[in-house]
Amino acid sequence: MERETSSLLIKANRVLGMRLVEAGLTTGEDMEEANALFIERARAKDLTRASLLRILLFEKAVLKESALIDYQLENFAVGAVRPDNFRVDPSLMKQTPLELLRASWSFPLDLCEGQWFMAGAYYMSDVVRTFWEERLGAKINWYVSPMEALEAAFSMVEEERLGRAAQNSREGD
């Protein structure tokens, strides 16, 4: 895992954890338990499982994703989408390393006239929003998304990249 990815992963989760507790969506005690697992996985460089939100939702089951999405829709200027309902231009994916997408639980949906549209599970972490705005050099229209839909999108991108790499390898032989 690159240093930039590691830094984003740690900061994004730290801030998201604080925001979830501040919003009353989880308790400090639950967050401490989830954080211990998160740190263990981050040290192991396990990007697919190093996520406070994933731990709180699916492993500890102390947070309901529907409650989180409803909270964000009610309190922030965001919509909700499922990235698997979009056909994403492959050129967008070339600009956005999969490792950084996984670390921030964010996924580009479209780029139209210099305006980015992204789906994410970590919208409440301003670290994530700032990171992508600086990296892409633009304001972003954000949409919240369920984690399983983002995981499916990441897997699709990974499979496409592996398929292209295998094809390029065969063509190079």
Image (cartoon, rainbow, N blue to C red):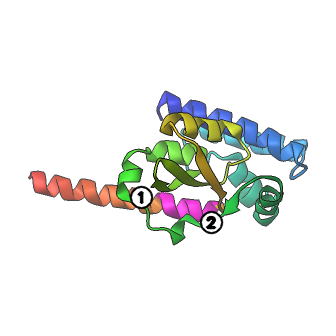
Q: Is 84 in front, or is 34?
A: 84
Image coordinates for residue 38, horizontal then vertical, percent: 68, 42
Q: Which residue of the protein is positioned furthest toward the left in this rendering?
A: 173
Q: Which residue is mark 2?
A: 81
Q: Is residue 54 magenta?
A: no
Determine if residue 148 is in view.
Answer: yes
Q: Which residue is mark 1?
A: 157
Report crowding for label 2: few under 14, some 14 to 19, many 20 or more residues within 10 A (C-alpha).
some
Q: Secondary structure at mark 2?
A: loop
What amino acid does circle 2 point to? Answer: Val
In this rendering, position of residue 166 left or right of residue 38? left
First to last magenta residue range: 147-154
Report crowding for label 1: few under 14, some 14 to 19, many 20 or more residues within 10 A (C-alpha).
some
Q: Residue placed at 72% from the left, 51% from the top?
A: 53
**Is disc 1 in contact with disc 2, using a CB cutoff of under 8 Å?**
no
Image coordinates for residue 18, horizontal then vertical, percent: 81, 39
